[in-house]
């Protein structure tokens, strides 16, 4: 592993860090592609931020993640008409977000949002239990829409028709 990537991972795993005056915390709203992400800053404004190429293979973000952005050239970018107004400095992990939520540096806009653990997608949802110990089975599909037929695969109608005609001829004799 080259030294640059190792130093990057070490810096990302640090628990204690302070925000400089030109940095702020933002939440990822959507991923736009080509290293651009849409973020919501502490004021509640949406804007585009650049996700540097040095993070490409070592840092992963998704919708709802929290990042530290550098907005030193924000006014200059807005005057020139550029849509990208800030640059991502650091990706915040679950433990870092939990620690920051307790500190006064955490923006009021994000007080009610809960950090998403990195391995939540791999966890199996636990059935909700009622107060008397019964399992609530009213939500069997976990809020998912009903399944639809796959239109990409053709069903061989001839095979089904032949099977029906054979069973009919067997019952006649």
Image (tube, helix red, strand yellow):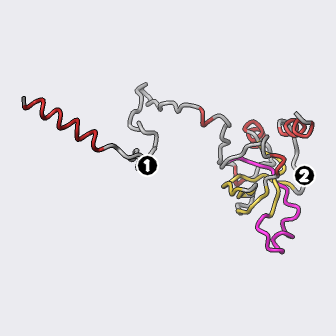
**Residue 152, horizontal then vertical, whole percent:** 43, 49
Q: Residue at x 68, y 42 (%)?
A: 115
Residue positioned 86% across, 38% down in the render: 16
Q: Which mark is residue 152?
A: 1
Determine the image quadrant of residue 138.
top left
Farthest left residue? 173
Helix, strand, or loop for circle 2? loop
> Label 2 crowding class (10 Å Cα cut-off): few <14, some 14-19, many 20+?
few
Q: Position of residue 122 (x, y in %)?
A: 60, 33
* 112 shown above or below 118: below
Magenta span of residues: 65-84
Residue nearest the viewer, comparing 172 with 134 = 172
Which residue lies most toward the top here?
A: 133
Tell me the quadrant of the picture where the N terminus can be found. top right
Does the segment drawn in magenta span residue 81? yes
| The C terminus lies in quadrant | top left
Tag nearer the camera, 2 or 1: 1
Q: Is residue 162 above or below residue 46?
A: above
Sequence-first tag of 2 and 1: 2
Q: In the image, residue 158 lies at what x, y percent?
A: 27, 43
Q: Position of residue 170 (x, y in %)?
A: 12, 29
Question: Mark 2 sits on what residue?
Answer: 20
Left or right of 120 in this view: 134: left
Question: Quarter of the image holding residue 83?
Answer: bottom right
Name the residue located 16 percent from the left edge and 32 percent from the top edge: 167
Does the magenta portion include 109? no
């Amino acid at each position: 592993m080259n030294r640059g990537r190792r130093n990057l991972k070490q810096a990302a795993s640090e628990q204690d860090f302070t925000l400089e005056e030109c940095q702020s915390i933002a939440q990822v709203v959507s991923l736009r592609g080509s290293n651009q992400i849409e973020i919501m800053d502490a004021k509640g404004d949406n804007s585009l931020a650049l996700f540097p190429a040095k993070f490409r293979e070592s840092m992963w973000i998704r919708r709802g993640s929290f990042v530290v952005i550098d907005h030193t050239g924000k006014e200059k970018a807005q005057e020139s008409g550029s849509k990208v107004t800030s640059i991502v400095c650091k990706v915040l992990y679950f433990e870092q977000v939990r620690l920051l939520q307790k500190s006064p540096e955490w923006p009021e806009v994000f007080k009610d949002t809960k950090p998403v653990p990195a391995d939540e997608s791999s966890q199996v949802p636990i059935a909700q239990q009622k107060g008397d110990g019964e399992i609530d089975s009213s939500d069997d599909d976990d809020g998912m829409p009903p399944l639809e037929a796959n239109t990409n695969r053709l069903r061989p109608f001839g095979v089904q028709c032949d099977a029906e005609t054979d069973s009919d001829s067997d019952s006649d004799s």
